[in-house]
Image (cartoon, rainbow, N blue to C red):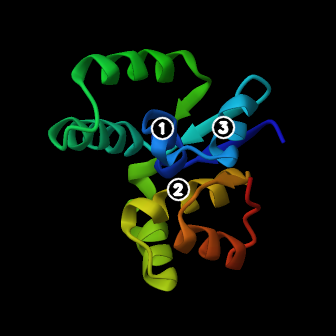
């Protein structure tokens, strides 16, 4: 394995300490050896989660800025093809596996690239298994 898809449930657990687990820490540490890829919706998901965290008093703008600096230092590649697959493959995966279109975008990317996926989302894990996508 040289790369894998990482979904927002794992990434944001690095930001919100109460959501961190041995699993999410291990995934973060694996980025010293492996690269990961994310669909092009990922930066918007991260931004929205940070914003909601600020609005709910779980984070500050300064903490979010430090986290963004960390993310920018990690080997995370943004897939430029996500939108081309959104209205066909991603939509179909979302229908078949009862996923949001956002979660289906991560699954579609893992399938297209032939790489495993790191996620904490139960429905996404179940769908990945059904589609033959390995889990990190």
User: Of the residues under marks 1 and 2, which one precedes in the sequence?
Assistant: 1
Q: Quadrant of residue 25?
A: top right
Task: Please name the residue that numbered disc 1 is placed on.
Answer: 17
- Point out the image quarter for the N terminus: top right
Quick check: can you spot residue 80?
no
Q: Nearer the viewer, residue 129 or 17?
A: 17
Q: Is residue 112 above or below residue 51?
A: below
Q: Is 64 situated left or right of 75 in this image?
A: left
In the rendered image, residue 88, in percent from the top left (x then y), is placed at 43, 69
Q: Is residue 126 above or below residue 48?
A: below
CA–CA distance in space, label 2 to label 3: 20 Å
Quick check: can you spot residue 39?
yes
Task: Please name the residue that numbered disc 3 is placed on.
Answer: 25
In the rendered image, residue 62, in percent from the top left (x then y), is placed at 27, 16
Q: Is residue 74 above or below residue 39?
A: above
Task: Please name the residue that numbered disc 2 is placed on.
Answer: 106
| Furthest-right residue in this view | 1
For label 3, the SS is helix
Q: How many marks?
A: 3
Q: Nearer the viewer, residue 28 or 93?
A: 28
For label 1, the SS is helix
CA–CA distance in space, label 1 to label 2: 23 Å
| Furthest-left residue in this view | 55
Residue at the spot 73% in from the left edge and 59% down from the top edge: 135
Q: Is 116 situated left or right of 69 in this image?
A: right
Residue at the spot 36% in from the left edge and 39% down from the top edge: 46
In the rendered image, residue 21, in percent from the top left (x then y), is placed at 62, 47
Question: Is there a contact, CB below 8 Å, between mark 1 and mark 2?
Answer: no
Q: Is 24 situated left or right of 50 in this image?
A: right
């Amino acid at each position: 394995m040289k790369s894998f898809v990482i979904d927002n449930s794992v990434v944001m657990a690095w930001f919100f300490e109460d959501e961190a687990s041995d699993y999410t820490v291990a995934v973060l540490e694996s980025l010293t050896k492996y690269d990961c890829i994310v669909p092009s919706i990922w930066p918007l998901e991260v931004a929205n989660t940070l914003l909601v965290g600020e609005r709910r008093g779980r984070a500050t703008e300064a903490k979010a800025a430090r986290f963004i600096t960390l993310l920018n230092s990690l080997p995370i590649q943004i897939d430029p093809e996500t939108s081309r697959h959104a209205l066909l493959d991603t939509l179909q995966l979302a229908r078949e596996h009862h996923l949001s279109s956002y979660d289906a975008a991560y699954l579609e990317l893992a399938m297209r690239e032939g790489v495993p996926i790191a996620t904490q989302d139960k429905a996404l894990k179940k769908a990945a298994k059904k589609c033959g996508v390995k889990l990190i």
